[in-house]
């Protein structure tokens, strides 16, 4: 049986007091920036202009009782589609930012038991690099494959830990947000009043600017005649929406109306930007919808039987027969009115012309 390989990557940062606690950690090893003389850094926060080269150091610490060998590489970051979490690309994927610009001095490193190794790296920003934020990470990957039971398990696991890199390239910064593809789906009981109704609001949050944003989203629903049905801030929003990233999110709405007509509006905001989008909805219980559909169908059938069908006249657009709702109103024929005859027109008498032979 062919095995499915899964990469488990830890890029979470624990903001505690000791320098080691700042590291991205999976319990067996950790990766973190070298501490400066001023304070320990929870991550790499770097700033550079296009064409500039930066130099820094990363530390890989082994917490196990045996030596470990890692592959060390840089990679780009992105937001996961599921919940907008911070994630990084694998070594096989194409790198366009930090993953292509940062290069550790050693691509593989062996760390002794309960020891640590510090590796320098350089980050060269291209001359034509776009201004704004370019997130990424330095990753220590254990290339060994782990599985519970090689005979029965079809999943093999690779583990990795990454230290985040937040790089800002000098130039104009443009914070911008967009709310896209707002949808609402209702969940109605079959019989009105016998069960709880609800709805699910889905939308796409898109960072259209060039800086990382911490967006806030507010949901507002209005019913018939402008009644406010719902107004609240949403909590299931990514705390870091990276530049250019889209995240599809959903929000449940418990107790949504069973019979109403209105619209929902989503407003996303962050420092320097604010954007809204809305969609309309019609809430109708299933039983009423079925009865209404059956009533409309019955009316159509009755009218069709009474009115019948008539063929389309020749030269009309399309073919087939006229439906019952297509009527041509005909007026009564009016009696003809005698028309006064016109006066005869006198014609000028023509003079008979003699033939050429009759001339003298």
Image (cartoon, rainbow, N blue to C red):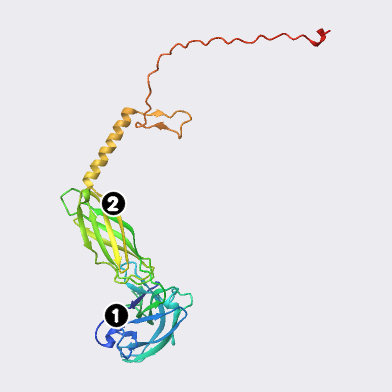
Q: Residue furthest right?
A: 360
Q: Residue at x 28, y 55 (%)?
A: 184
In percent of width and height, residue 8 lies at: 34, 76
Q: Element type at marker 2?
A: strand
Nearest the camera: 54 or 67?
Answer: 54
Q: Residue at x 41, y 83 (%)?
A: 71
Q: Is residue 296 above or below residue 179?
A: above
Q: Is residue 107 above or below residue 87?
A: below
Q: Which image quarter: residue 270?
A: bottom left
In which quadrant of the rendered image does the C terminus lie? top right
Location of mark 2 (residue): 280
In which quadrant of the rendered image does the N terminus lie? bottom left
Q: Residue at x 30, y 78 (%)?
A: 12
In percent of width and height, residue 117 lies at: 37, 90
Other-residue count near label 1 (Cα within 10 Å), few / some / many at <14 / 14–19 / ≥20: some
In percent of width and height, residue 156 lies at: 36, 76
Mark 2 → mark 1, Cα distance in angstroms: 41 Å
Other-residue count near label 2 (Cα within 10 Å), few / some / many at <14 / 14–19 / ≥20: some
Q: Is residue 23 above or below residue 153?
A: below
Nearest the camera: 250 or 271?
Answer: 271
Nearest the camera: 256 or 271?
Answer: 271
Q: Which image quarter: residue 160?
A: bottom left
Q: Residue at x 41, y 81 (%)?
A: 73
- Is there CB contact under 8 Å for labels 2 and 1? no
Location of mark 1 (residue): 13
Number of the front mark, 2 or 1:
2
């Amino acid at each position: 049986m062919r095995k499915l390989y899964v990469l488990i990557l830890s890029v979470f940062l624990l903001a505690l007091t000791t320098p080691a606690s700042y590291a991205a950690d999976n319990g067996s090893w950790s990766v973190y920036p070298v501490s400066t003389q001023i304070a320990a850094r929870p991550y790499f926060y770097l700033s550079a202009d296009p064409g500039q080269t930066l130099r820094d150091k990363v530390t890989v610490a082994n917490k196990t009782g045996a030596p470990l060998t890692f592959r060390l590489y840089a990679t780009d970051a992105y937001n996961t589609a599921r919940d907008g979490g911070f994630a990084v690309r694998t070594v096989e994927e194409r790198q366009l930012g930090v993953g292509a610009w940062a290069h550790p001095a050693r691509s593989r490193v062996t760390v002794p038991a309960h020891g640590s190794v510090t590796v320098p790296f350089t980050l060269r920003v291209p001359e034509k690099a776009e201004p704004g934020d370019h997130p990424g990470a330095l990753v220590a990957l254990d290339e060994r494959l782990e599985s519970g039971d090689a005979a029965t398990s079809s999943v093999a696991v690779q583990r990795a830990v990454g230290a985040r890199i937040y790089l800002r390239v000098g130039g104009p910064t443009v914070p911008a947000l967009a709310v896209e593809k707002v949808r609402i789906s209702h969940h109605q009981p079959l019989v009105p009043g016998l069960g709880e109704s609800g709805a699910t609001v889905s939308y796409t949050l898109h960072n259209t600017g060039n800086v990382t944003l911490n967006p806030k989203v507010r949901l507002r629903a209005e019913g018939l005649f402008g009644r406010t049905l719902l107004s609240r801030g949403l909590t299931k929003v990514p705390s870091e929406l990276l530049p250019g990233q889209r995240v599809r999110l959903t929000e449940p709405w418990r107790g949504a109306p069973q019979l109403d007509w209105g619209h929902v509006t989503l407003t996303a905001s962050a420092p320097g930007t604010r954007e809204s989008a809305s969609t309309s909805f019609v809430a109708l219980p299933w039983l009423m919808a079925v009865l209404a559909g059956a009533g409309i169908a019955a009316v159509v059938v009755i009218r069709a039987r009474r009115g019948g069908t008539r063929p389309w006249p020749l030269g009309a657009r399309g073919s087939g027969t006229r439906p019952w709702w297509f009527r041509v109103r005909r007026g009564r024929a009016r009696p003809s009115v005698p028309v006064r005859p016109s006066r005869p027109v006198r014609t000028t008498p023509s003079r008979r012309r003699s033939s050429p032979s009759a001339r003298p």
